[in-house]
Amino acid sequence: MSAIKKRFTIFPDEHGNGEWISLTDFVQHLRHRLKDTDQQKAIKLSNIKRELCGQHNSVKTIDSRECVSVLGVTRYMFHHADDIEECRSFSLEIIKCDLSQKKTAHISPVYTETVFDLYKIIATKKLRKCPSVSILTDSVQLDETKIPTLLEIHKTHFSEGEWREICVFEWHFGQTLNSNQDLSPDELLQAKCQYYHVCQTASFFADQCHIRAKGVISHRHTRKRVAELEKRIEFVKGETRHLPTIIDVQLLDCLRRQFSDKVTHVICVDSSCAADLTISVYVELSSQDISVTDDISHTIAYIVSTKHGLSCSQVLFFDPGAFDGYIRANDEVARFTLHDMVITRKLSHQIWYESPQRVSPT
């Protein structure tokens, strides 16, 4: 909570429920700390409000002020940690505070009387729990003769896998030593025990981060899935379901291969009438090149028909930059907002070409 309190003024609502922050203060805070190196180049109140409104009970009006919940701010910060340095700094503070409160008393320093005793501990308690890390390190050939701290006289007491763990530990330990150090056997054993404790601690926190990362990824996938179902972001024909995000990627890849960099964005939306499933496709080009519109339209209709069995009712071509106000931080277009703007004719002035109705794939 300290990461929040040192940045914002927090207050309850009129009923004393929850903790809230002024939406204007939150936006101004991000604007004043936006850096030239940040991937997100602008902080827009409308975009932030739209994203927060998509979260349950994150935005409300208190005493004529628009406010956002502390939970909503925290979600936003974590979601944009890769795009905005201030969000990244905030997220790291939260993680550091959370991890520091974990009970780590069981990670006590290991001190043994002999190197063999330490080897037995290393062999039985794997530090490299991530399968991908084990695969990568196990594929590396270690020359035991070039690991000066390794005591090969103990090799016969361990299995091949256990000895591999010991060799990896000794190799990394060797990288921490100064070539000019002249340690006695007892000092060397003590240094190994201390280094093993460092490895234990690092392994513990890595596991905690891995668990949290998996939870965040799972939550995002679930939230995206729920949002797509709620907003009907699935094209269903018979028993087959088509995700428009997949169609977008397929179309964009194909069009860029055929028409170089002329195509900047492609997005498809549902334009069905009754049981007749059709889609419309919005295309943003880098320039108003009328010579490629028919070819692009037929290519789109062909891909949609052959790969997905869908019909393309129309293809709309937009001015360069027409989608700029509808692109999220993850480079996805706000599909439904854009679709609503087209339906209500608020973007008519930026549509410079419209393909004929029922685009033919041939």
Image (cartoon, rainbow, N blue to C red):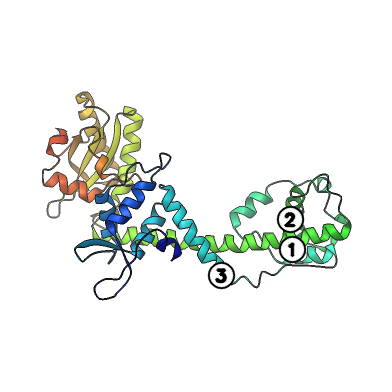
Q: Which residue matches tag 2? A: 169
Give the mark, 1 or 3, whose residue is nearer the N terminus. Answer: 3
Tag 2, which secondary structure?
Answer: helix
Q: What residue does disc 3 label?
A: 102
Nearest to the observer: residue 187 or residue 278 = 187
Give the residue type that dot 1 points to. Ile
* Point 25% across, 35% down: residue: 321
Q: Quadrant of residue 114?
A: bottom right
Disc 3 to disc 2, C-alpha distance = 26 Å
Residue 102 rendering spot, x and y as whole percentages:
56, 70
Q: In which quarter of the image is the C terminus?
A: top left
Q: Is residue 260 left or right of residue 347?
A: right
> Please, is residue 46 above or below residue 356 in the view?
below
- Side of 227 relative to 348 (left or right): right
Quadrant in which residue 78 is drawn? bottom left
Q: How crowded is mark 3: few (under 14 residues within 10 Å), some or many (20 or more)?
A: few
Mark 1 neighbour density, 10 Å: few (under 14) some (14–19) many (20 or more): some
Element marked by disc 1: helix
Q: Are marks 2 and 1 in contact (CB under 8 Å)?
A: yes
Which residue is identified by label 1? 122
- The label nearer to you, 1 versus 3, is 3
Question: In this view of the protein, which residue sits in the foreground, 259 or 127?
Answer: 127
